[in-house]
Image: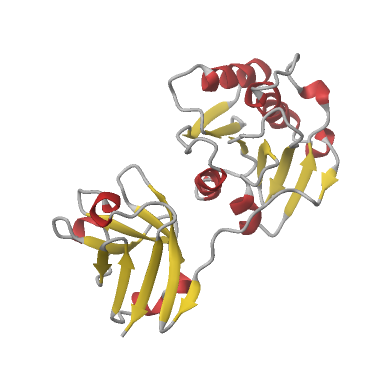
Amino acid sequence: MARPIITLTTDFGSADSLVGSMKGVILSIQPDAEIVDITHKVMPYDLLDGALAIGTAYKFFPPRTVHVVVVDPGVGTERRPVLATAGQHYFVAPDNGVLSMVYQSEESLTVRHITSEHYFLQPVSNTFHGRDIFSPVAAWLSKNGQSSAFGEEITDFVRFALPKPKPAGNGVKGVILRADNFGNLLTNLREEDLPQVLAGSNFKMRVGTAEISRLAQTFGNGGPNEPILILGSSGFFEVAVNRGSAAKTTGAARGAEVTVEFA
C-alpha cells in the first residue's frame, strides 16, 4: 500500500524550526507519511503568492494527497481553520482565501470548518496553528480519510478572484502576478487570452521599460539581455531574459501593468 503523502506550503522560510516542528507533529501521528515540501518561500503574509504556489502545484500529486497550506497573517484571530475536499485532493488551511486558485480550478468542492478539537495538539498556541491545528488534522486525515469527522460543511468560505485580463483597444491589458527566483515575470495572461500570439500574429507587449515583440519557445531562445515572451509551464505567459532577470531588465515587479497590442 502506498505511503500517504502530505505536502507543506508556507511562508515560514528555512531559518527557524517552524517547518521541522510541523513535520515532527505529523510523523508522531502518522509515522508512515511521506512529507513533501512544495515551498516555504511564499512571500510573507502574501495570500495571492500562496494561492499561486499551491494552485500551480497540487495537480501533479497523486489522488488523496493532503496539502497543508499555511500563509496565515490572521493566526489566533476569528478566522476559521478549514478542510477542503477539492477534486481528488484534500487541503488544510486557514479560511483567508489562500486556497482561492484551488477553489477556482475544481468543480467538485466541499469545504468544512474544522471544529473537532480532539484532533488538535494541546494546548493550542495562539500563534502557531500550523503546528497545533493544521499539521495534526492533516496527519489524522491521512490515517482515517473521513473528512466529515472534522467539522460541518460551510458555504461562506473566503475566496478572492485572481486579477482578470481586460480588453484594451485592439489588444488586452494584464498584470504581473509575481517575479520568481530567476526574475521571470509571471503574468495573469493565459493561452485563451492571447490566441493570436500563439497563432503567429504580430504583437507588441509593454511591461515596465520594455517593449516585447517576440514569442519564444523557451528561455534559451532569447538573446543577451533581450526580454522575450514565453508560455510558461504553469499555463501563464511569462516575460523572461535568457540567463538574466526580466524583473531587473524591465524594471517591473508584481502589480505592474502589462499591455498587448496586435497589428
Q: Which one is nearer the viewer's eye here, 120 or 16? A: 16
Q: Quadrant of residue 143?
A: top right
Residue found 54% across the figure and 28% down from its top: 35
Residue 235 location in percent, x, y? 44, 60
Residue 246 location in percent, x, y? 27, 53
**Residue closest to the far right:** 152
Q: Is residue 55 left or right of residue 174?
A: right
Image quadrant in which the N terminus is located: top right
Image quadrant in which the C terminus is located: bottom left
Q: Which one is nearer the viewer's eye here, 72 or 9? A: 72
Q: Is residue 20 left or right of residue 185?
A: right
Q: Quadrant of residue 168?
A: bottom left
Q: How is the image coloured?
A: secondary structure
With respect to residue 21, does 102 lie above or below?
below
Residue found 73% across the figure and 39% down from its top: 83
Residue found 30% across the figure and 78% down from its top: 203
With respect to residue 122, does 235 lie above or below?
below
Q: Is residue 216 visible?
A: no
Q: Which one is nearer the viewer's eye here, 2 or 92? A: 92
Residue 116 location in percent, x, y? 83, 28
Residue 249 location in percent, x, y? 23, 54
Count of picture labels: 0
Q: Is residue 128 visible?
A: yes
With respect to residue 70, does 260 lie above or below?
below
Q: Is residue 230 left or right of residue 64?
A: left
